[in-house]
């Protein structure tokens, strides 16, 4: 259910539509010609690709009924390839084993329940969209448990499944059996055939062929060790060759899976993965001497502690890239000093911030995104909190309430652009600014080029970038249009500069191809693009310059709105150097990454959120966001569109649980009155994008009233005018009017009477703009 939008939501009129010639705008110092268009600075050296990529199918520790996929260039450090891509309509999905069949499709076989007589089969052509094939009954008299089906490709090319069966219940004993597919679509299988010699309480049996013999790695359910058996055929007889803790892996262990690997010198061998389920860690170990000896176990990178029983196969990298290639047409992102240009079309980005980690119910994320869209916004800005996803070094969880890919996909489906802000430090009133707790045990200085910190930050970026990269507009995968490096980094010392360069290089190496930017705190002229920096600015490894500001002020301690603050000029009308806003980067679009849509509340407060929603309400929005528009801030993101709840251990010590923020959408997901005005402004922005996205200052006009501030912009290409009349500090009503010179004469606005502003208010007017689409 979604709340119906009030009938009061209306697009504001575009007034004074007059035919006129473009006035000459005032050029800004250091600006390039309007025809100069820039594109993201990408890595000059392509990232080397391995011949093979390791593909993992797993179920997650947080869920027993979803499939997640991971990939790795080395088979050791895995990143997300698809978060929770498939959930069967009923029953469970555990122990998924993946194979690519002769028809080119990928198939998983999986455990459908703790108790029952079936295993499941599902298929996919692209590893993203999965279709249920069948729940296959196992034809064994009295069978009560069918667990851990594992694909095995026999020497004749046929595909079989090795399954663990019990006729006495979950306590076993279990035995190993094979079932053979009877049709190419894997809808039916033959009767189970016992693997003679592996019937004495063995489970999770995984079979490979090595040196002309069959080799099984099976868990002894009595000793809890992984044992090795060999046989001349798949059916047996099987002989145990290695028992006890023969390889030094310890126990209890289970969920074993093997994949062929090569060492640094190209020598062929095998890698085994197994689950230390008591400590919730996944390990791997290698053998290059015919399975006789094995390297000391090491923890698996990226997914240990998060994944459960899985299978890994080695695929040709080119094949995997073909299968997973985005289906949509890639769209180019460029820009000039006025706006972003997406596929040759100017875009106004009217965005709002939303933190999925502050709404721990993925089923409600779409409700918030739809309300953002209904409020006139066309983009969403997402912070990603490192600490929310990483409980231990090397452990990353992107499932359930942490499934950020699902949030990104929902934004795409709702027609919203996405601005990705991954940190590593984000602030956001989070504990340690979003750093994971384990990072605080480092002695290295954070947010610098300290080796230990950069290694940890790189680990986080590897994981989150794998998700962001496949949803970029530039590769056809989604609607991500920009990527933020760090956040509000005040220090610009050499160690910070080297760190920022490291983050930029890492992002590009991870496949990020959209523009990079940094959010400079309080309009500090820091981290401007090297080819677009004012003399007073500090350049960095960015494509765009962005900044934040919270000009609305706060309520009094007794929750009274008080007197409105003055509206700032943070764009082309800026004067307060050096914290002047977009003029710090004269050749990139005006970009305010955060402009206050409210403010957080403190411990000990009387409760100010409703007061803040009034202080920064409809009048504030028309005045302050109108000031942003007339100042040519063509990328404009309000913080917050929806605040949510800082649950668990997330909130920093300065705030309490509620992060309502006085935002247009309340913590309870109710649209406040201020959302109506946001809707009006957003509708205007989208209707007038061609004129708003390419404005310069026009000649000053006299409103005839010193209490009214009148801005006048022109669009040279269209010959259009945009005007903003502001009345901010006063509570009374003020009348005004002005004359506008056009190509065909001089016009009085209005032609009769006067325009009026009452209290904190503003009017934005457009002249000589064709409304036809």
Image (cartoon, helix red, strand yellow):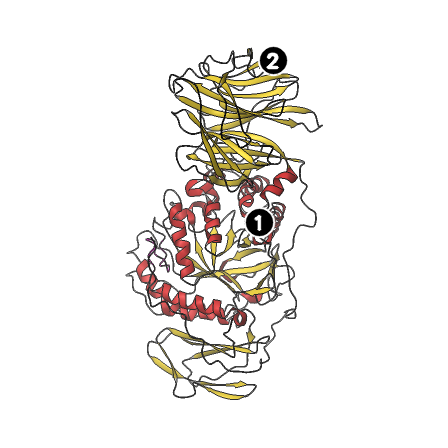
Expressed as whole percent of the image width and height from the top left, the position of residue 13 reads 42, 75
Q: Which of 765 and 345 is in front in this view?
A: 345
Mark number displayed over residue 276: none
Q: What element carries label 1?
A: loop
Q: Nearer the viewer, residue 151 or 711?
A: 151
Task: For residue 589, say whether it is visible.
Answer: no
Residue furthest toward the front?
A: 183
Q: Is mark 2 on a helix, strand or loop?
A: loop
- The relative height of residue 594 versus residue 205 in the rendered view (above or below) is below
Q: How far apart are marks 1 and 2 (CA)?
A: 46 Å
Above or below 661: residue 569: below
Of residues 768 and 700, the one nearer the viewer is 768
Query: Is residue 420 in the magenta section?
Result: no
Please give the label number shown on residue 327.
Answer: 1
Q: Main secondary structure of the magenta part?
A: loop
* Location of residue 319 by image quarter: top right
Residue beneath label 2, please? 232
Image: magenta residue range = 660-672
Q: Which residue is drawn at 55% across and 35% down?
A: 106
Q: Does the magenta stretch include residue 669?
A: yes
| x then y, percent, for residue 293 | 62, 17
Check whether the beta carbons of the residues at disc 1 and disc 2 lie within 8 A of each other.
Answer: no
Sequence-wise, the earlier of marks 1 and 2 is 2
């Amino acid at each position: 259910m979604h709340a119906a939008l009030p009938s009061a939501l209306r697009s504001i009129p575009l007034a004074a539509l007059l035919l006129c010639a473009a006035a000459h705008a005032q050029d800004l110092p250091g600006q390039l010609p309007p025809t100069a268009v820039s594109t993201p600075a990408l890595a000059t050296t392509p990232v080397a690709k391995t011949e093979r990529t390791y593909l993992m199918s797993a179920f997650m520790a947080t869920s027993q009924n979803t499939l997640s996929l991971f990939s790795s260039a080395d088979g050791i450090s895995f990143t997300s390839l698809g978060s929770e891509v498939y959930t069967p309509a009923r029953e469970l999905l555990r122990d998924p084993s993946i194979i690519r069949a002769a028809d080119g499709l990928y198939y998983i076989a999986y455990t459908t329940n703790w108790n029952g007589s079936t295993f499941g089969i599902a298929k996919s052509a692209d590893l993203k969209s999965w279709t249920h094939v069948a729940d296959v009954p196992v034809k064994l008299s009295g069978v009560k448990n069918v667990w851990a089906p594992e694909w095995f490709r026999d020497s004749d090319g046929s595909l079989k499944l090795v399954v663990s069966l019990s006729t006495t219940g979950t306590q076993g004993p279990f035995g190993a059996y094979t079932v053979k597919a009877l049709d190419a679509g894997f809808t039916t299988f033959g009767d189970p055939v016992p693997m003679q010699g592996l019937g004495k309480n063995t489970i999770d049996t995984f079979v490979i062929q090595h040196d002309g013999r069959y080799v099984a790695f099976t868990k002894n359910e009595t000793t809890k060790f992984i044992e090795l058996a060999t046989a001349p055929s798949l059916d047996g007889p099987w002989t145990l060759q290695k028992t006890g803790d023969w390889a030094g892996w310890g126990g209890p262990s289970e969920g074993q899976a093997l994949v062929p690997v090569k060492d640094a010198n190209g020598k062929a061998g095998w890698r085994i993965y197994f689950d230390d389920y008591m400590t919730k860690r996944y390990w791997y170990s290698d053998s290059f001497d015919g399975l006789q000896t094995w390297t000391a176990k090491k923890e698996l990178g990226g997914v240990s502690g998060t994944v459960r029983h899985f299978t890994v196969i080695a695929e040709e990298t080119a094949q995997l890239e073909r299968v997973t290639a985005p289906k949509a047409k890639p769209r180019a992102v460029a820009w000039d000093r006025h706006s972003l240009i997406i596929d040759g079309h100017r875009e106004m980005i009217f965005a709002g911030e939303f933190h999925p980690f502050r709404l721990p119910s993925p089923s409600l994320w779409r409700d918030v995104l739809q309300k953002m869209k209904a409020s006139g916004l066309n983009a969403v800005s997402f912070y990603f909190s490192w600490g929310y996803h990483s409980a231990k070094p090397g452990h990353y969880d992107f499932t359930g309430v942490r499934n950020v890919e699902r949030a990104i996909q929902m934004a795409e489906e709702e027609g919203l652009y996405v601005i990705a802000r991954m940190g590593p430090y984000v602030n956001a009133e989070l504990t340690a600014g979003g750093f994971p707790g384990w990072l605080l045990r480092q002695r290295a200085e954070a947010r610098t080029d300290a080796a230990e910190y950069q290694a940890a930050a790189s680990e986080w970026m590897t994981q989150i970038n794998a998700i962001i990269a496949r949803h970029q507009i530039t590769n056809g995968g989604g609607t991500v249009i920009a990527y933020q490096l760090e956040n509000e980094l005040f220090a610009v010392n050499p160690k910070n500069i080297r760190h920022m360069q490291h983050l930029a290089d890492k992002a590009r190496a991870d496949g990020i191809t959209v523009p990079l930017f940094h959010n400079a705190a309080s309009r500090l002229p820091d981290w401007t693009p090297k080819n677009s920096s004012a003399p007073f600015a500090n350049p960095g490894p960015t494509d765009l310059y962005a900044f934040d500001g919270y000009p609305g002020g706060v309520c009094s301690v007794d929750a009274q709105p008080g007197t409105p603050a003055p509206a700032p000029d943070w764009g082309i009308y800026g004067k307060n150097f050096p914290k002047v806003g977009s003029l710090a980067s004269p050749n990139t679009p005006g970009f305010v990454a955060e402009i206050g849509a409210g403010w957080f509340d403190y411990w000990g407060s009387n409760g100010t959120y409703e007061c803040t929603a009034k202080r920064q309400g409809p009048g504030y929005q028309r005045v302050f966001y109108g000031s942003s528009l007339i100042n040519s801030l063509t990328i404009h993101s309000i913080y917050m569109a929806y605040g949510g709840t800082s649950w668990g251990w997330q909130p920093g010590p300065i705030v309490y649980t509620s992060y309502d923020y006085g935002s247009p959408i309340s913590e309870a997901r109710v649209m406040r009155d201020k959302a109506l005005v946001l809707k009006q402004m957003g509708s205007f922005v989208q209707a007038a994008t061609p004129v708003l996205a390419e404005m310069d200052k026009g000649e000053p006009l006299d409103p005839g009233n010193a209490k009214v501030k009148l801005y006048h912009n022109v669009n040279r290409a269209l010959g259009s005018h945009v005007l903003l009349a502001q009345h901010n500090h006063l509570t009374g009503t003020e009348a005004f009017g002005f004359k506008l010179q056009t190509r065909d004469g001089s016009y009085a606005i209005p032609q009769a009477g006067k325009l009026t502003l009452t209290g904190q208010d503003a009017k934005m007017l457009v002249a000589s703009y064709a409304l036809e689409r």
